Image (tube, rainbow, N blue to C red):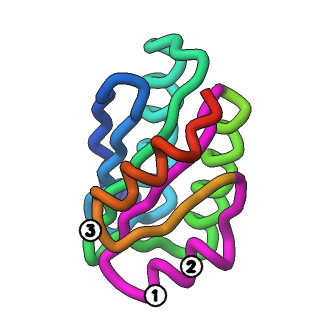
Amino acid sequence: MQSHGKLTLEWEGNVLVVTPQGPFNEEGAIEGITTLKETVLTTKVEKWTRLELWEENTLGSPTVIDYVRESYLWCVEHGCSATAIVVKNNFQHSLIEKYFTNNIGVFQNKRDAMDWLVNNDNA
């Protein structure tokens, strides 16, 4: 099946800015997670934080959510001390609160998310 969904990744200091684009199917999730892991391992940052900037249609199936949840745990095991997610709607907010843990904050704007990351960075 063709991959749907894309991740844009960019380091801003010790903050990995992750921008998921579009809805994700399983292939798209696996592809994005593989790229994320390669980026973290290549950069060799010991302690870092993660800022995610979701679009209105950033969603996935229950299987995709499981893959993403596993990737968050992988990130924690590889130095991510906090993740701030900027969402566009209440459905996204409720999904994150229901399925994700490990020092994750959910926000409506980037400024509040960055402030929270600075205050929750255990690095």
Label 2 and label 1: CA atoms lie apart by 6 Å
Q: Residue at x 65, y 57 (%)?
A: 69
Query: Which badge, 2 or 3, is on the more N-terminal residue?
Result: 3
> Which amino acid, mark 1?
Phe
For the residue labelled by badge 1, is the local secondary structure a helix, a strand or a loop? Answer: helix
Q: Nearer the viewer, residue 117 or 3?
A: 117
| Residue count near mark 2 (Cα–Cα under 10 Å), binned few <14, some 14–19, many ≥20 | few
Label 1 and label 3: CA atoms lie apart by 12 Å
Judging by the rendered image, the residue that carries numbered circle 3 is 55
Q: Residue at x 44, y 14 (%)?
A: 43
Q: Position of residue 48 (x, y in %)?
A: 52, 29
Residue 31 falls left or right of residue 67:
left
Magenta segment: does it hold 65? no
* Image quadrant in which the N terminus is located: bottom left
Q: Position of residue 86 (x, y in %)?
A: 37, 64
Q: Are marks 2 and 1 in contact (CB under 8 Å)?
A: yes
For the residue labelled by badge 3, is the local secondary structure a helix, a strand or a loop? Answer: loop
Q: Position of residue 107 (x, y in %)?
A: 41, 69
Judging by the rendered image, the residue that carries numbered circle 2 is 95
Residue 95 falls left or right of residue 86:
right
Q: Position of residue 74 (x, y in %)?
A: 68, 38
Please tell me whether residue 48 is drawn above or below residue 60 in the rendered image. Answer: above
Q: Nearer the viewer, residue 85 or 27?
A: 85
* Image quadrant in which the C terminus is located: top right
| Residue count near mark 3 (Cα–Cα under 10 Å), binned few <14, some 14–19, many ≥20 | some
Magenta segment: does it hold 90? yes
Judging by the rendered image, the residue that carries numbered circle 1 is 91
Provide the residue span drawn in magenta.
79-102
